[in-house]
Image (spheres, grey):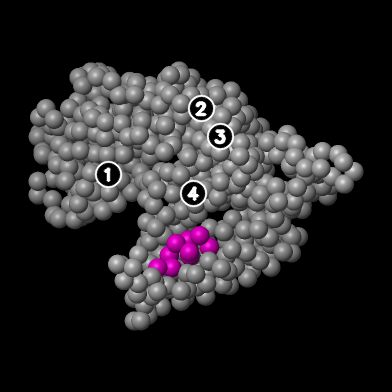
Amino acid sequence: MLNYRFPRDEALFLLQDVIALPALDEVGSEMVGAIMDEAARFGETCIAPANITGDQQPATLTESGVEETPGFADIYRQFQEAGWPSLAGDPEYGGQGLPNLLSTATSEIWQSANLAWALCPLLTQGAIDALSHHGSEALRTTWLAKLISGEWTATMNLTEPDAGTDLAALKTRAVPEGDHYRISGQKIFITWGDHRMADNIVHLVLARLPDAPAGVKGISLFLVPKFLLDEQGAPSQRNDVKVVALEHKLGIHGSPTCAMSYGDDGGAIGYLVGEPHQGLACMFTMMNAARQAVGVQGLALSERAYQAARGYARERVQGTLRDGSRVTIVHHPDVRRMLLQMKAACEAMRAFAYEASAEVDRARAATDDKEKAAREKRVALYTPLVKGWMTELAQEVCSLSVQVHGGMGYIEETGVAQLYRDARILPIYEGTTGVQALDLIGRKIAADGGEALNALFGDIERSLNDCGDAPEVLRTGLSDALHALEDTVQVLMTPNPEDPQAAAGGSVSLLMALGYLCGGWMLLRSAHQAAQPEETTPFLQMRQQVATAYAEQLLVRCNALAQSARAGAKTLMQVDEAQF
């Protein structure tokens, strides 16, 4: 069984020295450290040991519903009773009101420890965001406190058998009936769609009203509980919603992925969230929160994969020196290359994920309308990068872990095969990498004429000017990458009659290049902070070495990706489909 240890020093260095969010100063460094230490203890000793159990004993479907992996319910009970779900919740509804950044840092622990289990509270947080922003006062009063406390959990219901990413084809219906609606239809790929870990499950469901216009403009969002509430607000009568099948998946076996049926016996009772026909905008609030959270999952599995590879490399004896002595494989240059590349990737991802999370806090705290709008645009710009770049990079890191293990990595007993399988869903759910790239180039860059992206480029340029004590190879590489991407964006944003789909064709390469650029930017800031103390330490020296390794092994990809992005779609679209 793999052991997991939260990288406490790296995380606290980011939280307290690199990100330095004012809201964390209000919490206090001692309290932040205590929270992270307790989260690490709970994740390492309680959640992590059940990771392999979920892989080997997945949830099952019974006549009365889904029965989760043995032991998962007890872990969730302890998690909920300890107050972890309410960490960043609104105090008006029983939350602790701590910064979003702190919640993200603890979420990394849950996801590293047991990704399949941790998907349940992850989706609940997304539903909390959606209801907080779009729910009526009555809905918030009725549902938020129990969700924030973790007594109830939540799901997101978008996908249908004939409507995947193309939500315009959605068929689920909602018919008004007094103060509620009757929902009927089917949904698939619903993560944690049913279980027995909580007293109720709140499903957020996209459906169409009878007078809905065609396409995505006719979609509304509804809150559909597993159990209806009695006059005291307690779960009572079972609603007309049930699980009809569980998906058999490549990975995340411990997370029940459900096919749901609504309205087999007259219609499930649901309540409108937000305005009629505005469901997609409401759901995107939940989805965007989930997309950043999935990016953190990429970091989380990468960290665990790195730790596994590091441990194996230190123990596995293979190879003989000239003096005849035997050595462990960590002494071989290529193994060191893989380990250092993995570590640099993890540290860059962690820093960028924390920065993106901190920007959410900055946007919420802004009192000036202009600053608030700029912060919100930055959050929107970061979201597809966190989700797309970090989940794609996680595939490589987990694969490298298997490679470091050699043949043993291909054997299930070592545990890294599970990480590799679990990671493969990350670039798919909550919008594929291609969807993130189109969102980036269409909604986040073109929609405002590149204003938000240019502001980011400006911040990176200022950091280059301010961080002269960071490794030269990183500063030079980051400057070259920045200028290459400025030119690339200009090319893709300029209409080209000979290649009308150029932006779409180059979008994924652009997304990945911007991800590597942002990762380098964060390690530049990290190396700069590590150079400030008068007396250096091995920990601070390593921050400089990690930054150098990132520049040499990963940042150099930016120029190649920029060249690929500038190639556009001309060649792609010229090939006759019969030739594929």
Which numbered disc, 4 or 2, marks the residue closer to the eye?
2
**Mark 1 touching mark 2, by CB under 8 A?**
no
How many numbered tags mark residues here? 4
Gap in angstroms between the C-alphas marked 3 and 4: 23 Å
Q: Residue 426, labelled with which disc?
A: none
419 w.r.t. 199: above or below? below
Provide the secondary structure element on which disc 1 rests: loop
Q: Does residue 511 belong to the magenta stretch?
A: yes
**Mark 3 touching mark 2, by CB under 8 A?**
no
Which numbered disc, 1 or 2, marks the residue closer to the eye?
2
Toward the right, the furthest residue is 323
Provide the secondary structure element on which disc 2 rests: helix
Tell me the quarter of the picture where residue 290 sits: top left
Provide the secondary structure element on which disc 3 rests: loop
Q: Residue 411, labelled with which disc?
A: 3
Q: Where does label 1 land, which residue?
A: 159
Tell me which numbered mark, 1 or 2, is placed earlier along the sequence. 2
Magenta residues, start to end: 505-513
Which numbered disc, 3 or 1, marks the residue closer to the eye?
3
Give the class, few, some or many, for how many residues have Cα within 10 Å of label 4's Cα (few <14, many ≥20).
Answer: many
Identify residue type, mark 4.
Thr
Tell me which numbered mark, 1 or 4, is placed earlier along the sequence. 1
Q: Residue 391, labelled with which disc?
A: 4
552 w.r.t. 228: above or below? below
Tell me which numbered mark, 4 or 2, is placed earlier along the sequence. 2
Which numbered disc, 3 or 2, marks the residue closer to the eye?
3
Specify whether residue 397 is in view: yes
Tell me the quarter of the picture where residue 43 sits: top right
Q: Position of residue 182 (x, y in %)?
A: 13, 34
